[in-house]
């Protein structure tokens, strides 16, 4: 996949276009920090903003976007349904809450944040309804393993177009990314830099030196070149800009292979299988 600009989009299986790079907002809670981050992100070219009800910041993000005073069709909003609100009626209600919080009449993408066994099909059915009602343009999932997708397929009227999973050089999940691709599902990486865990890696450091780039930029570029979308988060203006400055260099196949070799199945977050069983993140 050739990615040449932060404005580049991928066409999802439902025909909607999604930017390959977006801005993650986990842990941005105070209105001041959110305002500054969103303004810097917008000026740096980010056009996708990723939130979740679990982050308790939808209102702040909605306010920050209103302050930019830009047309709604110029940006893409993703949010997620948290475990306690899964179920048919409660998911429909949660979608309405997100619309109000984000001060918009449609959401570009709503994801089931984590699979849980008791409401597995009901939550998805509600997202299909929210889409049919025009409140949501695209529906997807997050933290689904192949088995969850195959199980969903037994009852879904339509399949997710996105599966957002933890992904970075220490947890590359290549078989999952490949399965998503074969199933026409786009994979965005959450914690694309492993929340900082991969940024001191000596191999990535060598590649960074050779390109005159930071390790963060090398890691983000690696995702894009293997067809994985990214939503890096930072509250620091210089890093927000740095993470958007990925489009003037190219990693070689050899460098990509070196990065692929760093996988050690190391998670920063929960194992989806446990969340499926116990029904919440811990
Ligand atoms: N679906 C899910 O279950 C799920 C789970 C987790 C996250 N997410 C989404 O994915 C987004 C990204 O994941 P994440 O926030 O967990 O992790 P991340 O983007 O991999 O890393 C963020 C951390 O790295 C630091 N950082 C950012 N850019 C940097 C740079 N250029 N150089 C050095 N350090 C840098 C940030 O520090 P500062 O902010 O202090 O600059 C922050 O501590 C989230 O914000 C959220 O939107 C989704």
Image (cartoon, helix red, strand yellow):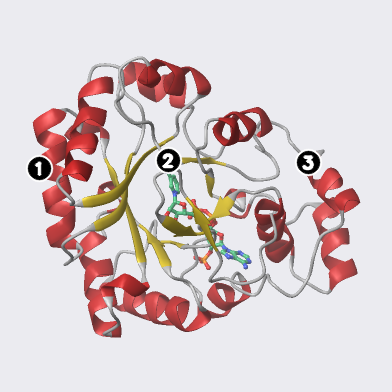
Q: Where in the figure is residue 242, as x and y percent of width and height?
A: 62, 75
Q: Residue at point 61% right, 55% down?
A: 196
Q: Residue at point 41% right, 50% down?
A: 15
User: Where the C terminus falls, by quadrant?
Assistant: top left
User: Most extreme residue toward the front, as rendered?
Assistant: 15
Instruction: Quickly name the residue at label 1.
Output: 93
The Cα–Cα distance between marks 3 and 1, rounded to whole angstroms, is 41 Å
User: Where the N terminus falls, by quadrant?
Assistant: bottom right
Give the label, 2 or 3, closer to the camera. Answer: 2
Element on which disc 2 rests: loop
- Note whether 33 is above or below 16 in the view shown: below
Disc nearer the start of the sequence (1/2): 1
Instruction: Decide: few, some or many residues near mark 1? Use Cα within 10 Å; few <14, some 14-19, many ≥20.
Output: some
Q: Can residue 282 be seen here?
A: no
Give the label, 1 or 2, closer to the camera. Answer: 2
Q: Can residue 243 be seen here?
A: yes
Instruction: Quickly name the residue at label 3.
Output: 260
Element on which disc 3 rests: helix
Disc nearer the start of the sequence (2/3): 2
Instruction: Quickly name the residue at label 2.
Output: 161
Q: Where in the figure is residue 216, as x and y percent of width and height?
A: 68, 62
> In the drawing, does residue 165 fall left or right of residue 119?
right
The Cα–Cα distance between marks 2 and 3, rounded to whole angstroms, is 25 Å
Element on which disc 1 rests: helix
């Amino acid at each position: 996949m050739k990615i040449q600009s932060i404005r580049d989009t991928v066409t999802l299986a439902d025909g909607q276009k999604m930017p390959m790079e977006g801005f993650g907002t986990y842990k941005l809670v105070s209105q001041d920090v959110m305002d500054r981050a969103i303004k810097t992100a917008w000026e740096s070219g980010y056009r996708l903003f990723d939130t979740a009800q679990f982050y308790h910041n939808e209102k702040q993000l909605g306010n920050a976007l209103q302050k930019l005073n830009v047309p709604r069709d110029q940006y893409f909003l993703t949010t997620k349904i948290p475990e306690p609100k899964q179920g048919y009626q409660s998911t429909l209600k949660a979608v309405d809450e997100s619309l109000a919080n984000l001060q918009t009449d449609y959401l570009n993408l709503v994801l089931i944040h984590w699979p849980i066994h008791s409401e597995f099909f009901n939550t998805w059915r509600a997202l299909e309804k929210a889409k049919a009602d025009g409140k949501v343009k695209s529906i997807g999932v997050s933290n689904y393993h192949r088995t969850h997708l195959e199980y969903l397929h037994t009852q879904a009227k339509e399949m997710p177009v996105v599966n957002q999973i933890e992904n970075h050089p220490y947890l590359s999940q290549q078989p999952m990314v490949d399965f998503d691709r074969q199933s026409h599902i786009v994979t965005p990486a959450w914690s694309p830099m492993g929340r900082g865990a991969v940024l001191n890696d000596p191999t990535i450091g060598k590649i960074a030196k050779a390109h005159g780039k930071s390790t963060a930029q090398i890691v983000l570029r690696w995702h894009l070149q293997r067809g994985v979308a990214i939503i890096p988060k930072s509250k620091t203006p210089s890093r927000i800009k740095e993470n958007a400055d990925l489009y003037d260099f190219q990693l070689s196949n050899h460098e990509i292979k070196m990065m692929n070799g760093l996988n050690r199945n190391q998670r920063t977050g929960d194992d989806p299988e446990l969340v499926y069983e116990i029904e919440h993140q811990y």
